[in-house]
Amino acid sequence: MRRFTITAAVAVMAAATALSATPAQAHGGQHALGLENCTATACHFGVAPGTYDVRVVLGGDTAASTAVSGETRRSLLPETATEAGRTVARSFTVNVRTPEGEPTGPEGTPGLDLVIGGSAPALADIRVTPARPRTRQIFLVGDSTVCDQPGDPYSGWGQQLPQYLRKGLSVANYADSGESTVTYLATPALFPTVQPLIREHDLVLIQLAHNDKTTDEATYRANLETLVAGVRAQGGEPVLVTPIVRRWFNADGTLNNNTALLVNGLGVDHPAVIRSVAAAENVPLIDLTVKTKALVESLGVEGSKAIYLYNEKRDNTHTSVHGATVYAGLVRDELVAQHLVPDGLVRVG
């Protein structure tokens, strides 16, 4: 059974803080919201949609190991160990929006919800304040392999990406299950909603391919170009991402060239088109197809089952929490290697 501790000293601090900032005051930056908003393993902050900095102090009298997730199952802070009698401070920035998960899904709970987890959670203090107005965001445009999945055992890699980022950089995940380049552009809750939110120097990672099963090559290319142009029109920085592979093996242990590598029924090689558009439009490319193919083949038929939902659902397309975390790490590595984000805003190791 997990245990949760709040030290006596912190309880006094929380009582003092409970001279109570209202949600409106917190959003206006006059006061930080703190432990008075927390119960044993969860915190709720009645803030308006926006971007918020969260500072937590972890640890206490006994050894502890604490992780923080929030909203629709987003991993915001990786599990952090603390020795008995010691505390550590960690900070991250979180996007609060409605709907809080998939853009076409239910609205979710208003405000910011955090879950204090880990094998031995210990939260000593917490402070939530509005982020600076020009805090940079990473917008995600994608499908079910990227989105904030609402329930176990599913997880998109975008759901796990926030844990790799530090204060000053947040993830606004607008990926949505079942979307193609065609539907993402046409659905009001998707690109028509995302585009006006993009500000100068925001990154927009675009991974759409899995559901373009009947999209011809000319249309697929044109749609990618439209997304790139739409991001640039707002001053944002588009990044094209080739799709994660499907776990579909040949008899020789390699991945199937069509099913696994996202070639649709019309013969459209989605990763190849994405690479071509990236080169033609001078857009950074994260080649997740190449990276996930190498990883899955190295793990083999049995080892790769842990990455996908094969063991639970016989699903060779969607990832487990473990797999999504591994794939988010690959994205993190490329963001750093290509200098798309400052090193100081990324957690490594």
Image (cartoon, rainbow, N blue to C red):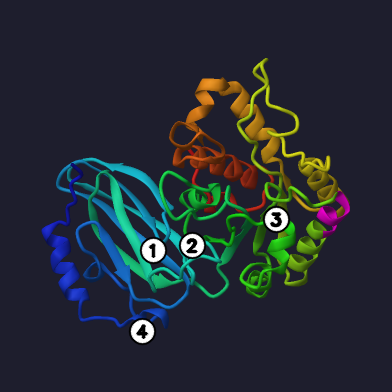
Mainly helix, strand or loop, the magenta region? helix
Three-letter residue code for mark 2: Gly
Residue at the left extreme? Answer: 8
Q: Earlier in the sequence, mark 3 or mark 2?
A: 2
Side (left or right) of 260 relative to 229: left
Which span is picked out in magenta? Answer: 217-222
Reading the image, the residue beneath label 1 is: 54
Is residue 242 shown above or below 221? above
Question: Image point 73% across, 50% down: which residue?
Answer: 212
Mark 4 residue type: Gln
Mark 3 or 4, which is nearer the eye? 3
Q: For mark 2, what is the residue?
A: 101
Which quadrant holds residue 7?
bottom left
* Mark 2 nearby-residue class (10 Å; few <14, some 14–19, many ≥20): many
Report which quarter residue 92 is drawn in: bottom left
Which mark is in front, 1 or 3? 3
Where residue 60 appears, as percent x and y from the top left, is 19, 50
Q: Is residue 29 above or below residue 322?
A: below
Q: Secondary structure at mark 1?
A: strand
**Please, is residue 110 above or below residue 105 in the view?**
below
C-alpha span from label 3 to label 2: 18 Å
* Residue drawn at (60%, 31%) of the image: 247
Q: Which residue is mark 4?
A: 25
Residue 104 at what x, y percent from top left?
55, 66
Q: Amino acid at mark 3?
A: Ser
Q: Which residue is mark 3?
A: 180
